Image (cartoon, grey):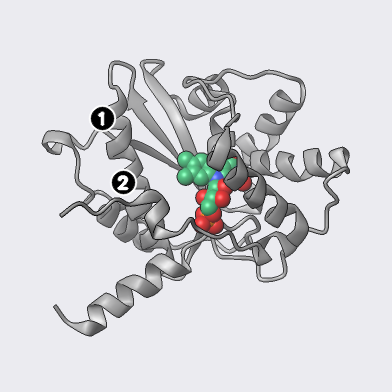
Amino acid sequence: MSEQLSAAFEQIVRQRRSVRGFTDQVVPRKTLERIFSLAGRAPSNCNTQPWDSYVVSGNTIETLRERLPQALMAGDYSMDFEYSGKYDGAYKERQYDAAARLYNAMGIERSDRDARTAAFARNFEFFGAPHAVFLFLREDFGMREAADLGMYAQTLMLGFTAFGLASCPQTALSFNAKLVRDVLGVDPHYKLLFGISFGYEDQNEPANDCRVERAALQQTTHFLD
Ligand SMILES: Cc1cc2nc3c(=O)[nH]c(=O)nc-3n(C[C@H](O)[C@H](O)[C@H](O)COP(=O)(O)O)c2cc1C
């Protein structure tokens, strides 16, 4: 295998990160089709390709950008998959570290609950992105198909990076699955796992200065001879 290919892969993987501020520049449809076709090369159990993607732009994303914050600020939640957001041990430490780094980049004090809430609410406005994709699974599918969907999503996000785009995967975009389904006209038998905002990175957004670390290899990976 060529060293060039390895270097290119490493660069794409290291360059991808969650971006939380986008310009309003739209991505040409042909580019989107190319990247989403590549994402479809992800592996899946028995090649079932159980992902159902809805890419929203234009009026559709603007409708959601208006209605999602309204609904969620009014306490109108309807999640298809349980999510407590509570972790313990090393998982909790990593969660706290990631949050601290993000709020630090944004200049928000830990004690400033209003500023933190306002920052979190930007999730529901897609961080200003001109596009997002919602990832659905048929209701009778389980963990294995959800894992397939994760592989698809990561292939997609690496594709965005390789094509000069940025993205942010967001469980927050699934907090009112019913509203999303209604606006998109999705069959109620399809359940919303998460969404991904994407577009061009806004270089002037302080949140985008955030960088999070990863655990040491030996903490997560066990090599057995
Ligand atoms: C499935 C999934 C859901 C996520 N949900 C959110 C979210 O709702 N809001 C957010 O700001 N970041 C969200 N993230 C981004 C994570 O915080 C981020 O991936 C993690 O901190 C690692 O940072 P990095 O993506 O910059 O490498 C999510 C990531 C994944 C994979």
**Residue to which mark 1 is pinned:** 144
- Which residue appears at 68% of the width and 48% of the height? 99
Name the amino acid, label 1. Answer: Arg
Q: In this view, does 38 lie to the left or right of 47?
A: right
Name the amino acid, label 2. Answer: Tyr
Judge whether 138 appears above or below 208 on screen.
Answer: above
Q: Is residue 153 left or right of residue 19?
A: left
Marks 1 and 2, how far apart in space? Answer: 13 Å
Q: Is disc 1 in contact with disc 2, using a CB cutoff of under 8 Å?
A: no
Q: What element carries label 1?
A: helix
**Picture coordinates of residue 109, whole percent (x, y):** 86, 51
Judge whether 171 appears above or below 130 on screen.
Answer: above
- Which residue appears at 60% of the width and 63% of the height? 211
**Picture coordinates of residue 20, whole percent (x, y):** 63, 55
Mark 1 crowd level (few <14, some 14–19, many ≥20, 10 Å Cα): few
Judge whether 168 appears above or below 56 on screen.
Answer: below
Quarter of the image with the C terminus is: bottom left
Q: Is residue 4 left or right of residue 119?
A: left
- Which residue appears at 41% of the width and 22% of the height? 191
Q: Which mark is residue 152?
A: 2
